[in-house]
Image (cartoon, rainbow, N blue to C red):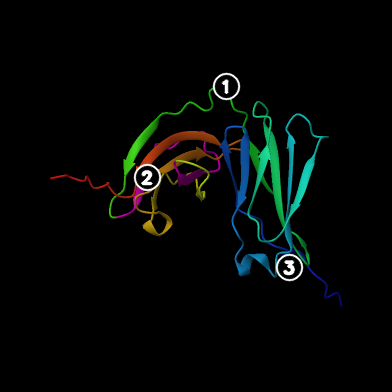
Amino acid sequence: MWNGPTFLDVPDALDVWMQQKMNQTVILWKKLLDSQSHGDITGYEVKWEKTDEKNHLNRTFLTPDIYNHTLSLDTTQQHVVTVTAKNKYGRSPLSTIIIPAMGPGGTEVKTFSIIGSNRNLDLSWPQSLTASCGYIVVWSPAVGFGPVEWLKLPPNRSTVRISSEHLTEGLRYLLLIYACTKGAPVLLEKREGYIAETREVTFL
């Protein structure tokens, strides 16, 4: 009887996202839980190529303690990036994200202010027909390359509460709402603000 590894022994697919700033694109993925990794992760593989140049595939291998990789891409071209996790039994299913091309002025979306309530940030937005596979809510410090966190929501969900355990008081956050599509994610809205109003200091 065959008792070797099965498909269920390989890691689950990774939850992958990206951050675009200037001419750099950071590919990010969440660390798998023990119930998802099915053993120790031995490394990750990142592959990328332009969507119109399928025969020019690039790849790199990363150690198991790394959960992001920075790419210098031609921002005028759309790219396809895939990430897999490896354990002793094999590779996880592909996690694919399409990196959209950026115009000269970037994506033109107006930024609205937001202030938290009870140390949480409550977001809501109009449902979009573009969001065929749901929404992605992303937040990170508004300045610099700080930690990026994200949630993926189904198409019938257009509200979310980001709790204070994921936020730091006094830090200004940039929040992005994307539509998940069959192609590249589409930026719908931008919000910027704090989990609580900052106190004004009065000098006597």
Q: Give the residue type at disc 1.
A: Pro
Residue 61 covered by magenta stretch = no
Distance between the alpha carbons at the discs numbered 1 and 3: 46 Å
Q: Residues within 10 Å of mark 1 (few under 14, many from 20)?
A: few
Of labels 1 and 3, the one closer to you: 1
Residue 138 covered by magenta stretch = yes
Distance between the alpha carbons at the discs numbered 3 and 2: 38 Å
In the rendered view, does 56 fall on the left or right side of 184?
right
Q: Give the residue type at disc 2.
A: Leu
Magenta segment boundaries in residue numbering: 119-142
Q: Which residue is mark 2?
A: 123
Q: Residue furthest top?
A: 104
Which residue is found at the position 81% from the left and 35% from the top? Answer: 56
Q: Which residue is mark 1?
A: 104
In the rendered view, does 156 fall on the left or right side of 82?
left
Q: Examine the rendered structure and indicate whether residue 186 appears above or below residue 159.
A: above
Which of disc 3 and disc 1 is earlier in sequence? 3
Residue 109 image point, x, y percent: 45, 28
Instruction: Identify the disc placed on residue 9.
Output: 3
Q: Residue furthest bottom?
A: 1
Q: Residues within 10 Å of mark 2 (few under 14, many from 20)?
A: some
Of labels 2 and 1, the one closer to you: 1
In the rendered view, does 78 fall on the left or right side of 168?
right
Image quadrant of residue 52?
A: top right
Q: Residue furthest right?
A: 1
Can residue 95 be seen in this snapshot?
Answer: yes
User: Could you say whether the residue bearing mark 3 is in a helix, strand or loop?
Assistant: helix
Can residue 183 be seen in this snapshot?
Answer: no
- Quarter holding the N terminus is bottom right
Q: Residues within 10 Å of mark 3 (few under 14, many from 20)?
A: some
User: Could you say whether the residue bearing mark 1 is in a helix, strand or loop?
Assistant: loop
Q: Examine the rendered structure and indicate whether residue 123 appears above or below residue 126.
A: below
